[in-house]
């Protein structure tokens, strides 16, 4: 097996625009960067709210290996039974114990590397979930020792909570990345004990929007303070992702690089 593994992490994929952009560009990104494994946050795949079996399979068919989730996980109820059946789909490990599915998974690359992915959700401004730090501890105990990399998606609002997770898992995870805010941060770094970190990967969706939603409806809700239906922008998506190279023997990150593919 190769001594290193190249991992591409993609932030929240927003509806049809995000799916279309990835269908057009992801296979080329995988080839160009010699990517071994792709993880993406899929909680906004279906018109911005949740995911369906069809939208998930669309992403798996173009090279995504694991889809993580977040607070919109159950917006499309049809996905609930599939969470128990498909190990490529995970939801936050600190959801209630009654939630279907699993909070972490291990998948194998074509070259034989086993990659673990843990999904967590924050508590600050996000709801009364169980502690994500304790959930991370529990998952790390259960994950087999022969994995080549451990990836952690912390789906959270507060940057401090995401940063805290990055420090908490230094030397235990290979890459801790934030999702949820839909805005990419430029703080990609490798912590002293080998854990790559980025506060938010950013969304793959239209940035001529308000976090992927049509401006008019979002502004009406803000200005008028009345209920308003959000609708995802369907064209003009940018891809934001982050590429990390991991030493398979130590599980430590060797490099981290942001990737941006602008809309056509």
Image (cartoon, rainbow, N blue to C red):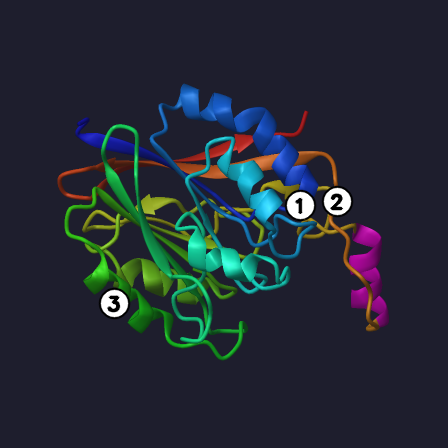
Question: Distance from label 3 to label 2 (Cα)?
Answer: 38 Å
Question: Distance from label 1 to label 2 (Cα)?
Answer: 8 Å
Magenta stretch: residue 41 in it? no
Q: Are marks 1 and 2 in contact (CB under 8 Å)?
A: yes
Q: Are marks 3 and 2 in contact (CB under 8 Å)?
A: no
Q: Residue at left 19%, top 64%?
A: 141
Is residue 215 depicted above or below 161 in this figure? above
Residue 64 location (% of width, % of height): 46, 37
Magenta stretch: residue 218 in it? yes
Q: Which residue bears the numbered disc 3? A: 137
**Marks 3 and 2, the one that precedes in the sequence:** 3
Q: Is residue 90 visible?
A: no
Q: Are marks 3 and 1 in contact (CB under 8 Å)?
A: no
Question: Distance from label 3 to label 1 (Cα)?
Answer: 33 Å
**Marks 3 and 1, the one that precedes in the sequence:** 1
Q: Residue at left 32%, top 69%?
A: 135
Of the 4 image quadrants, the one containing the N terminus is top left
Disc 2 packing (10 Å; few <14; some 14–19; many ≥20): many
Is residue 143 depicted above or below 134 in this figure? above
Q: Could you say whether the residue bearing mark 2 is in a helix, strand or loop?
A: loop
Q: Report the side of 177 relative to 185 (left or right).
A: left
Foreground label between 1 and 2: 1
Q: Report the side of 245 relative to 10 (left or right).
A: left
Residue 182 location (% of width, % of height): 58, 51
Residue 143 location (% of width, % of height): 22, 56
Is residue 159 depicted above or below 95 in this figure? above
Choose top left, top right, bottom left or bottom right for residue 249: top left
Q: Which residue bears the numbered disc 1? A: 15
Q: Report the side of 143 relative to 105 (left or right).
A: left
The residues colored magenta run: 215-224
Q: Which residue bears the numbered disc 2? A: 233
Of the 4 image quadrants, the one containing the C terminus is top right
């Amino acid at each position: 097996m190769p001594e290193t593994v190249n991992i591409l992490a993609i932030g929240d994929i927003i509806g049809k625009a995000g799916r279309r952009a990835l269908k057009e560009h992801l296979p080329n990104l995988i080839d160009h960067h010699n990517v071994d494994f792709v993880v993406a946050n899929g909680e906004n795949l279906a018109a911005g709210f949740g995911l369906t079996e069809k939208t998930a399979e669309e992403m798996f068919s173009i090279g995504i290996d694991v889809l993580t989730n977040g607070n919109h996980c159950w917006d499309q109820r049809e996905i609930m039974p599939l969470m128990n059946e498909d190990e490529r789909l995970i939801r936050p490990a600190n959801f209630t114990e009654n939630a279907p599915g699993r909070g972490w998974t291990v998948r194998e690359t074509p070259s034989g590397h086993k990659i673990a992915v843990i999904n967590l959700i924050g508590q600050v401004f996000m709801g009364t979930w169980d502690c994500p730090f304790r959930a991370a501890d529990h998952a790390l105990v259960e994950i087999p020792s022969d994995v080549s990399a451990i990836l952690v998606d912390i789906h959270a609002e507060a940057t401090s909570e995401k940063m805290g997770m990055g420090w908490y898992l230094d030397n235990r995870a290979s890459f801790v990345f934030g999702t949820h805010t839909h805005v990419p941060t430029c703080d990609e770094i490798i912590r002293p004990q080998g854990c790559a970190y980025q506060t938010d990967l950013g969304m793959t969706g239209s940035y001529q929007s308000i976090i992927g939603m049509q401006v008019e409806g979002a502004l009406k809700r803000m200005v008028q303070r009345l209920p308003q239906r959000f609708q995802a922008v369907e064209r003009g998506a940018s891809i934001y992702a982050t590429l990390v190279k991991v030493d398979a023997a130590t599980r430590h990150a060797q490099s981290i690089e942001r990737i941006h593919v602008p809309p056509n």
